[in-house]
Amino acid sequence: MKKLLLLFIAAFTIVSCSVEETNEDRADLVDVTALSEERFINFMEEDALSNGLVPEAINPDASVYPYDIESIVAVSDLNKLLPITNPEFGNCVDQDGIDPATGESALNLKIAKVQDGILGGLISNNTRFTYTLESTDGWFIYSVFMNIDEDCDDLPLSADGTPNVCRFNIRNCFGSRKTKVTYTFSDSCIDECTCNSVYAVLYRLNSHGCISERKGIWLDGDQVGDSVGTTNSFCKDDCGTGGISNDN
């Protein structure tokens, strides 16, 4: 009887461990908001890979943009104070990324020309450009893949002609519940005319903090060959005179 009891306990332990391991492997059963940032990023990368949203694992530290990025700011609270810009002056690009399943916007990119200064006061000629990505409709941003080049012909492609986002020159992963990411470049770090290609991995959470949906979204633009990838171009001369930033 004792031997049978020990066998039962051992079998129960094995089953319990198997269920626990299965739960940890299933994104819809894990409260990702409770994970540390490092565990969250690793977890989401595996999820993106297993769901075919990225072709290979990425190393965010291996971004190869040829110039310095002045800052990258990712926030989850849209009411948090950020540099104030006037979109009517300096707006260069305002482009949505459409969810093919719903036809609704899931992502928006605004590129703006900004000058340092104090509202109502002195304005310097220190010109910068901001690339602001903002998710909509309950989506969160996990990773951003952005390629900024002078010529669209320089876009990294896979053998089948599809843009290879893991070879884009800017690629970053972010912690949980991020809804807005702003990249800031000094004027000298952006060519006079640029070709931009932007792809993002987005996700939604249910009431338990578990992933309920995930997908990759391209910004609307010129189609790259027969692929779903896109590009957008703009020149600095297309922008306004530059909004005012009070962040310094």
Image (tube, grey):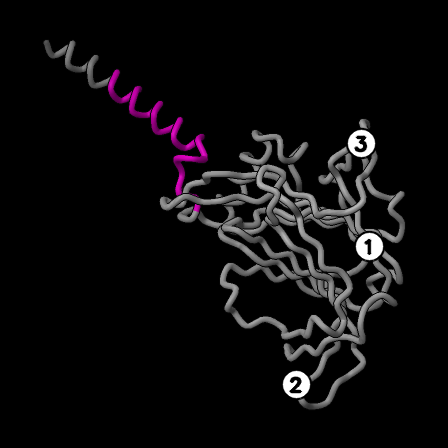
Residue at mark 3: 226
Q: Of the numbered discs in the image, which one, if any, rests on residue 144?
A: none
Q: CA distance from mark 3 to mark 1?
A: 29 Å
SS category of the residue bearing label 1: loop
Q: CA distance from mark 2 to mark 1?
A: 33 Å
- Residue under label 1: 66
Q: Residue at x 72, y 40 (%)?
A: 165
Q: Quadrant of residue 95?
A: bottom right
Which residue is label 2 attached to? 119
Residue at x 58% of width, y 53% of height: 135
Assess disc 3: are there few (<14), some (14-19) or many (≥20) residues with their C-alpha within 10 Å of its C-alpha.
few
Image coords of residue 53 (percent x, y): 62, 35
Q: Nearer the viewer, residue 118 or 171?
A: 118
Mark 3 or mark 1, which has the lower sequence index? 1
Q: Nearer the viewer, residue 220 or 48?
A: 220
Give the prevailing secondary structure in the magenta stretch.
Answer: helix
3 or 2: tag closer to the N-terminus: 2
Q: Amino acid at mark 1?
A: Pro
Few, some or many residues within 10 Å of mark 2 (<14, 14–19, 20+)? few
SS at mark 2 in the image: loop
Q: Position of residue 203 (x, y in %)?
A: 53, 43
Mark 1: few/some/many CA within 10 Å (<14, 14-19, 20+): few
Q: Amino acid at mark 3?
A: Asp
Q: Left or right: 237 with respect to 248?
A: right
User: x, y (%) of residue 229?
Assistant: 75, 39
Placement of 19 over or under 182, stated as above or below: above
Give left or right: position of 90 versus 175.
Answer: right
Residue type at mark 2?
Leu
Task: Give the extent of the magenta segment.
Answer: 11-32
Left or right placement of residue 215 versus residue 19 in this view: right
**Which of the 4 image quarters holds residue 242?**
bottom right
